Amino acid sequence: MAETKTSTATCMIDSIGTTAGDIWGYLADNGEVTLAKMKKDLKIKDSSAEYAIGWLARENKVWVEKRGAHTKLGLK
């Protein structure tokens, strides 16, 4: 049976939520970090980190700032 748009979207939202939880825990343990370091440490290779950070930012849980060539983030 083919996957529907709804089930694909639900799966993606679940994945983003899980990644957001992983990122929140990582930031709680490590403090302010660069996006590149966090993605490397958490072994996130796709854009799910950016989606999850957007989710956390929308919920006012993290701050994100561009500093030169790097993007830094941390918990609020």
Image (cartoon, helix red, strand yellow):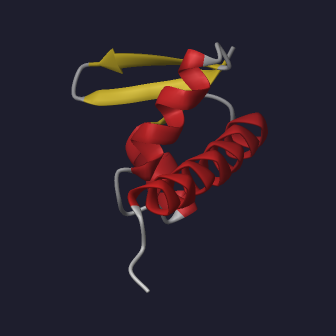
Q: How many marks?
A: 0
Residue 23 appears in which quarter of the rendering?
Answer: top right
Residue 15 horizontal/vertical position (percent): 57, 57
What percent of the width, then of the height, locates residue 49?
A: 46, 46
Say which residue appears at 40% left-offset and 16% top-offset: 65
Left or right, 4 with reference to 33: left
- Picture coordinates of residue 9, whole percent (x, y): 47, 53
Instruction: Determine whether 36 is above or below 46 in the image.
Output: above
Compared to residue 1, the image places residue 40 above or below, namely above
Q: Nearer the viewer, residue 26 or 21?
A: 21
Taking 36 as reference, is 12 left or right?
right
Residue lying farthest to the left in this orientation: 69
**Residue at x 47%, y 28% (from the top left corner):** 54
Q: Quadrant of residue 32?
A: top right
* Foreground of the two, 75 or 12: 12
Judged from this view, the residue extending furthest toward the bottom is: 1
